[in-house]
Amino acid sequence: MTIMGIDEVGRGCWAGPLVAGAVVMANDYTHDANLPWKLADSKQMSKLQRQRAEIGIKESPMIIAYGLGWVTSLEVDALGLTKAVSLAMERAAGATGIDADQIIIDGSYNFLPERSNVMTMIKADASQPTVSAASILAKVARDNWMAEADQGFPGYGFAAHVGYGTAAHRAALATLGICELHRRSFKPIAAL
């Protein structure tokens, strides 16, 4: 039996892509101290912890496959947030190349209702290794993407706030206006 964990990153961001991670593990593994990553929500880890964990996950013999699903800010605007998350998760699941026996999605909402093998679980990123790993992979990939975008869009501070609605991001928007990475359907951006 194979288990796929899925989590998304960037849902509440004002700019940049939405990214879902999917990780597949065999279920014969037991929760123990041999995990090559910290079992935690990626947002609760330091940047260095996430980067080290990403390497461990990608090199771990416990991992059968992993994949990422990217949805652009334009797609988020066109589809709406719920459908965009569903699309990111479908893309991530598809990128693994595995038809898992069970899928666990972090949270209480099933973003993959067409699939019969989905289970939702609140705080799964802190209790399920596959979901924790998916969360870490998605967060590292998205943060790296936003750091690169920072070079193409100087002044916005994307490398620091990675698109979230921080005071620094608001200040940059007041000075520079919106750019092509911003989600125009989000109220704070639409107001500009």
Image (cartoon, helix red, strand yellow):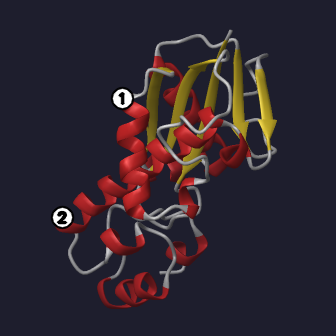
Residue at x-position 75% and y-position 50%: 123
Residue 179 coordinates in the image, percent (x, y): 32, 69
Q: Amino acid at mark 2?
A: Gly
Quadrant of the image containing the N terminus: top right
Q: Which residue is mark 2?
A: 152
Q: Quick check: 125 left or right of 67?
A: right
Coordinates of residue 102 in the picture (x, y in percent): 72, 18
Above or below — where is 75 with respect to 151? Answer: above
On the image, the x and y values in percent for residue 148 come to 23, 58
Residue drawn at 33 percent across, 60 percent down: 146
Q: In which quarter of the view is residue 154 placed?
A: bottom left
Q: Quadrant of residue 120?
A: top right
Name which of mark 1 and mark 2 comes first in the sequence.
1
Q: Is residue 101 left or right of residue 74?
A: right
Give the side of residue 26 with respect to residue 51, left or right. Answer: right
- Specify whether 49 is left or right of 81: left
Can residue 141 be seen by looking at this rendering? no
* Residue located 40% across and 43% down the image: 54
On residue 59, which mark appears? 1
x, y percentage for residue 175? 32, 90
Residue type pointed to by label 1: Glu
Q: Quadrant of residue 84?
A: top right
